Image (cartoon, rainbow, N blue to C red):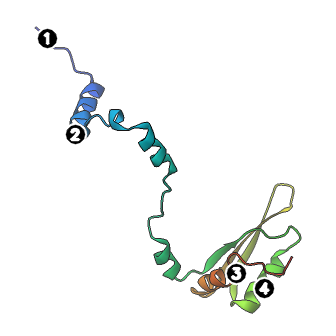
Amino acid sequence: MKSRPRNRHSSGRNARAKVLGNTTATVTPAARQRIKATKVSPAQPAAATAQQPADKIIVSNLPQDVNEQQVKELFHTTVGPLRDVTLHYDSAGRSKGVAAVQFQRKGDGTKAFQQYNNRLIDGS
């Protein structure tokens, strides 16, 4: 008598169930709500990432009439020498109000972040 080949997937499920147990039956609706409400934290704590010197920042919520030259002038005069400033535009050529600013020195990005994060720059 010839034995039939086993279904590969069923043995894998049984082995997994033996190791992990039946986890779906033990999750209550209340536990499911707590899981959905939990925020995922980054791999490194915020305190550790704040301590590392950065050379690049992203500036957002810029008015549409601000150009790259104005962003360069602001950060060069108040923080330090720049490597590159890139203002982002949509397909129609209008500013998205977001700029990437890269500094020449490693710690200047951190300095700019501490100086300007959540601050109104020109009072408008």
Residue depth check, mark 1 versus mark 3: number of the one nearer the observer: 3
Q: Secondary structure at mark 2?
A: helix
- What amino acid is labelled 4 in the image? Leu
From this view, report whether residue 53 is shown above or below residue 14.
Answer: below
Residue 81: x %, y % from top left? 69, 89
Alpha-carbon span between mark 4 and mark 1: 81 Å
Q: Earlier in the sequence, mark 1 or mark 3?
A: 1
Q: Label 3 belongs to which residue?
A: 116
What kind of residue is marked 2? Answer: Val
Q: Which residue, given by chain and number where applicable, does mark 4 sit on?
A: 74
Which corner quadrant holds the N terminus? top left
Of badges 4 and 2, the one in the foreground is: 2
Q: Quadrant of residue 10?
A: top left
Which residue is the site of mark 2? 19
Query: Residue 112 or 47: which is nearer the viewer?
Result: 47
Mark earlier in primary sequence (4, 1): 1
Q: 31 left or right of 78? A: left
The residues tagged by marks 4 and 2 sit, at their Cα atoms, a distance apart of: 59 Å
Looking at the image, is mark 2 or mark 3 earlier in the sequence? Answer: 2
State left or right for residue 22 relative to residue 74: left
> In x, y percent, where is residue 122?
83, 81
- Which residue is identified by label 1? 2
How far apart, in angstroms, are the residues tagged by discs 3 and 4?
11 Å
